[in-house]
Image: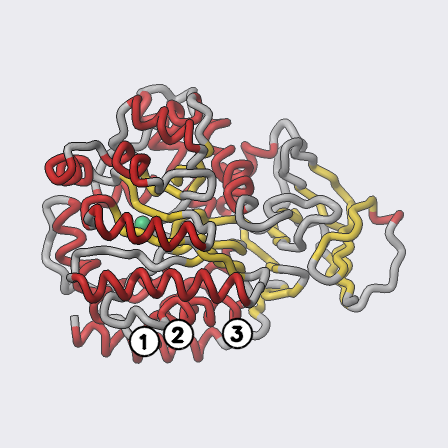
C-alpha cells in the first residue's frame, strides 16, 4: 500500500480530547492514518514525504450545508433588488437555477472544489437545484467531486414550485443517485434525499418522498424555517408548524439534516432533539438574507447536534466560524457567551455530522481517514490544548492552507494544486457563466 510520511509537524488532533503535539510525524498508509509519533520515533522509508517545517497538521474542514451551483452567481448584477427572503429566491436563485445545464452543474461544483482545496475544506454536504436539467445533475456534481478528489454528500432539492413533472423528476433524481451510491460504493460520495423546504412542498409529494427514501434507508436534507415565511405559508397550508409537519410525515431522524432552523419554537426544538435530527447553522447567509439569527446556544442546551455550514457564501470554514461567533455575541447581547459553543460547531459537531455518513472523519487519530491539511501558521503566542481555539479564531483564520490531503492523496502541496488545471477550470467556467448570464 502507498505510504506518505509528513514529518516535523505540530499535530492538532481535534476529536473528543484535542491534543497539540509539536515535532510529530504522521504516517499515512493507503487511505488511513497509520501512525502518529514524535519525529524521532518514526524512521520509515515512505513512498512520499512532506516536510511540514513546523506547520500545523489538522483534520480537513467539513462544510455541513453547501450549494455548489451558486458559484455561477458570483458577480451577477442582473437580479432585481429584493425586499425580503421570498424575493431573494424569486429574483435570483429561482431564476438562476432554472437556466443551469448539466455542464454548468459540473463546472460550478469544480470551481467551488478548487476553492475548497485551497481553504482546506475536504468534505462538503451539498444541496443541488437545476429544475430544467435535473436528470443526471447529481452525477455531474459527483463527477466534479471525484475529479477534485474531495468528499461530498449530495442530494437534489425536490420542490413543487415548478409543477408536477419537475417535482416527479426531482424524486427520481434523488432515488437514482441514492441507488447509484449504494450499488457502487465509493468513499468519496454519499447521498441524502433532498427537499427544498416545507413551504414549496405539498403533503402528497412529501409522502411520496418519504416512501421512496425509506426503501433505501436514506435521510433527508432540507431547509427548515430559514425565514418566518416558511412557518407562515406552511401553517396556512397545513395548520401545522414546519417541524411538527416534517415530524408527522416521518422526515425527521438521526440521518436528517435541517438547515437554518431560525424560526422554531420550543416545542419544535424539542421535536428535533427527540428525533435526533441534525441542525446546520449558516450565519453569513442568514445575515446576508436578513432572515434572523438562529438560537444556537438554546439548540445545544436541548442536546441537539448543531453543525456549521456556509450555504455557499464561502467554502472557508474559519471565515464562517468567526461570523458564527460575532452574531452569537450580538444576538445574546453578551460578548462572553458562545465561544465554546461556536468553535465546537466546527471542531466537534461537523465531524459528528459527517461521521453519521462516513467513519473516521474530522480527527487525527490512528485508523482515521487521512483527510489532513497543513496550515502555514507559526504561533506568535503560546500554543497548546488550552489556547488552540483562540489561535483558531484569531490567528488561523488568517493563516494559509499549505497542503490538502484527502483519503491519503495529496490534492495540494505547498499551495500547488495537483491534478487540477485551475486556469482551465476558470476559463471554461467563465465561458459557461457568460452564456448562463445571457439566459438569465
Ligand atoms: Zn441552503
Q: Residues within 10 Å of mark 2 (few under 14, many from 20)?
A: some
Query: Front-most of 206 and 286?
Result: 206
Label 1: element kind: helix
Numbered label attached to residue 426: 2
Q: 270 above or below 21?
A: above
Label 3: element kind: loop
Left or right side of 382 for 24? right
Label 2: element kind: helix
Query: Front-most of 323 and 394?
Result: 323
User: Is residue 313 visible to us here?
Assistant: no
User: Is residue 393 visible to us here?
Assistant: yes
Horizontal and vertical percent position of residue 352: 54, 40
Q: Residues within 10 Å of mark 3 (few under 14, many from 20)?
A: some
Quadrant hosting residue 160: bottom left
> To which residue does mark 1 refer?
430
- Whichever of callouts 2 and 3 sits on the residue coming sooner in the sequence is 3
> To which residue does mark 3 refer?
420
- Whichever of callouts 3 and 1 sits on the residue coming sooner in the sequence is 3
Query: Front-most of 323 and 222?
Result: 222
Left or right side of 379 for 88? left
Verify CB contact (< 8 Å) between mark 2 and mark 1.
Answer: yes
Amino acid at each position: 500500500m502507498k505510504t506518505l510520511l509528513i514529518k516535523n509537524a505540530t499535530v492538532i488532533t481535534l476529536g473528543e480530547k484535542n491534543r497539540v503535539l509539536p515535532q510529530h510525524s504522521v504516517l499515512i498508509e493507503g487511505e488511513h492514518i497509520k501512525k502518529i509519533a514524535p519525529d524521532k520515533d518514526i524512521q520509515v522509508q515512505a513512498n512520499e514525504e512532506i516536510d511540514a517545517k513546523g506547520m500545523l497538521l489538522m483534520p480537513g474542514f467539513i462544510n455541513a450545508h453547501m450549494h455548489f451551483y451558486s458559484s455561477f452567481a458570483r458577480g451577477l448584477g442582473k437580479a432585481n433588488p429584493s425586499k425580503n427572503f421570498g424575493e431573494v429566491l424569486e429574483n435570483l436563485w429561482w431564476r438562476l437555477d432554472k437556466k443551469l445545464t448539466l455542464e454548468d452543474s459540473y463546472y460550478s461544483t469544480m470551481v467551488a472544489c478548487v476553492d475548497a482545496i485551497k481553504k482546506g475544506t475536504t468534505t462538503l454536504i451539498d444541496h443541488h437545484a437545476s429544475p430544467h436539467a435535473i436528470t443526471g445533475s447529481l452525477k455531474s456534481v459527483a463527477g466534479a467531486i471525484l475529479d477534485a478528489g474531495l468528499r461530498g454528500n449530495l442530494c437534489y432539492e425536490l420542490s413543487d414550485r415548478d409543477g408536477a413533472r419537475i417535482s416527479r423528476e426531482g424524486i427520481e433524481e434523488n432515488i437514482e443517485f441514492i441507488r447509484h451510491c449504494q450499488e457502487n460504493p465509493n468513499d468519496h460520495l454519499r447521498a441524502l434525499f433532498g427537499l427544498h423546504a416545507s413551504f414549496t412542498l405539498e403533503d402528497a409529494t412529501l409522502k411520496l418522498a418519504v416512501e421512496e427514501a425509506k426503501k433505501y434507508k436514506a435521510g433527508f436534507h432540507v431547509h427548515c424555517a430559514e425565514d418566518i415565511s416558511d412557518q407562515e405559508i406552511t401553517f396556512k397550508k397545513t395548520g401545522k408548524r414546519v417541524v411538527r409537519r416534517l415530524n408527522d410525515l416521518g422526515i425527521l431522524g438521526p440521518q436528517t439534516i435541517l438547515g437554518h432552523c431560525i424560526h422554531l419554537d420550543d416545542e419544535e426544538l424539542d421535536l428535533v432533539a427527540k428525533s435526533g435530527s441534525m441542525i446546520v447553522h449558516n450565519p453569513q447567509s442568514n445575515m446576508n438574507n436578513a432572515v434572523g439569527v438562529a438560537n444556537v446556544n438554546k439548540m445545544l442546551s436541548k442536546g441537539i447536534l448543531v453543525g456549521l455550514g456556509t450555504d455557499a457564501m464561502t467554502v472557508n470554514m474559519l471565515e464562517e466560524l468567526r461570523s458564527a461567533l460575532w452574531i452569537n455575541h450580538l444576538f445574546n447581547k453578551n460578548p462572553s457567551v458562545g465561544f465554546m459553543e461556536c468553535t465546537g460547531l466546527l471542531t466537534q459537531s461537523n465531524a459528528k455530522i459527517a461521521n453519521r455518513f462516513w467513519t473516521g472523519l474530522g480527527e487525527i487519530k490512528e485508523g482515521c481517514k487521512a483527510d489532513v491539511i497543513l496550515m502555514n501558521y507559526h504561533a506568535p503566542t503560546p500554543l497548546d490544548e488550552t489556547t488552540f481555539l483562540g489561535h483558531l479564531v484569531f490567528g488561523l483564520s488568517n493563516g494559509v492552507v499549505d497542503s490538502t490531503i484527502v483519503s491519503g492523496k495529496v490534492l495540494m502541496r505547498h499551495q500547488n494544486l495537483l491534478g487540477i488545471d485551475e486556469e482551465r477550470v476558470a476559463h471554461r467556467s467563465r465561458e459557461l457563466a457568460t452564456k448562463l448570464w445571457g439566459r438569465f
